[in-house]
Image (spheres, grey):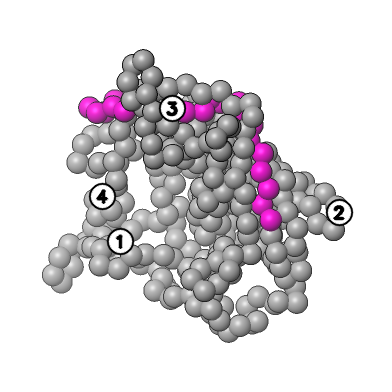
Amino acid sequence: LDMNIEYEDNSDFAEFNTPRIYLEENKYVDKSAAKNSGYIDLKILTVSNLAVGNGMFSKDKVGLYKDIMTNGEYPIIPGSSLKGAVRHIANIVSDGCIKAKSGRKYVIDVPNANLKCDVKNKCIICDMFGMMKVKSKLTFSDAVSKSAKTKVFNVNCQHSPKLTVAKYCNVEKGPRNNVGKLKGYKLYCNKVKKYDAYKKIRIKAILPGAEFNTRIFFNDLTDKELELLCFALGCTKTFNLKLGGFKNEGYGQVEISGNVIMDGKSVDAKLYAENYKNKYKEFSRSITDVEEIMYPYIDGVKK
């Protein structure tokens, strides 16, 4: 959002955790415990309008509008989009490393924030989701909906955030320039305040009530990693993920449920997600941040 203009910014911040890197290969994660392989059958239900753009414009009788992703016949949520959203939540509620671009006028005031993962020394998130020269243990398939209904809307244009303003940083005087200490991980709220920007754009969006189905395949996850994955999907039902664009408008809220399939047995993913929340109390503050900011809302009312 362009912070030079008085728009409503429907976002908040989850505090940084202290990153921890695997001290050496086989030490922090016991590979003998990494025995969980299988898949998760997922159902993704749109709670608000969903706009996963394809980068192209289409035309109707009124004019041009931004179109949505399809597989040629049905609307889809790309696996890469779901993976990115899940990774972000998983990173917040664990001791994953902090990815920060250099050369910016801000700092991350957290111990170990500058530690870098590598092939032998990597955090739990890079171990699960992969990184340069490290293969991901997870494969996210595209989610397809055969029931989705769509409509074209006139919405506010979105703008990139300016990270050095007070909304994002606690600004302090540096030896040469003003620098800002980032407040934490940005999350878009599911409860939004409407605002009216000076510039609008037309977009196609999927309406609430559409059901998408997909699978996530996983290989050699530890119990903790599998539980973290299910929590980050929102399977506790204590928060809803946001996907696609125009999140500041309230778009993109989805409810996710699923079953973990291993060795021919099916277990509700909610049980794994609740195990993570209940077992790893050191992340309770971050879990609470996510649940309070992304609590399920429909039309501004708690679900």
In this view of the protein, which residue sits in the foreground, 275 or 33?
A: 33
Determine which quarter of the picture holds residue 120: bottom right
Mark 2 packing: few (<14 Cα in 10 Å), some, or many (20+)? few
Q: Position of residue 174 (x, y in %)?
A: 18, 68
Q: Position of residue 208 (x, y in %)?
A: 56, 26
Q: Name the residue type under label 2.
A: Gly
Q: Residue at x 39, y 40 (%)?
A: 55
Q: Residue at x 52, y 74 (%)?
A: 133
Q: Name the residue type under label 4.
A: Lys
Q: Which residue is mark 1?
A: 181
Please check the rendered image and state whether residue 216 is part of the magenta-colored stretch, yes or no: yes
Residue placed furthest toward the left: 176
**Pointer 2 and pointer 3: residues touching (CB < 8 Å)?**
no
In this view of the protein, which residue sits in the foreground, 236 or 143?
A: 143
Mark 4 packing: few (<14 Cα in 10 Å), some, or many (20+)? some
| Magenta part of the chain | 194-217
Residue placed furthest toward the front: 72
Q: Name the residue type under label 1.
A: Lys
Q: Provide the secondary structure element on which disc 1 rests.
A: strand
Q: Name the residue type under label 3.
A: Lys
Q: Earlier in the sequence, mark 4 or mark 2?
A: 4
Which of the numbered marks, if any, corresponds to residue 264? 2
Q: Residue at x 48, y 68 (%)?
A: 97
The span from disc 4 to disc 3 (Cα, nearest Å) is 27 Å
Q: Provide the secondary structure element on which disc 2 rests.
A: loop
Picture mark count = 4
The span from disc 4 to disc 1 (Cα, nearest Å) is 13 Å
The span from disc 1 to disc 3 (Cα, nearest Å) is 37 Å
Q: Which residue is mark 4?
A: 162
The span from disc 2 to disc 3 (Cα, nearest Å) is 40 Å
**Pointer 1 and pointer 3: residues touching (CB < 8 Å)?**
no
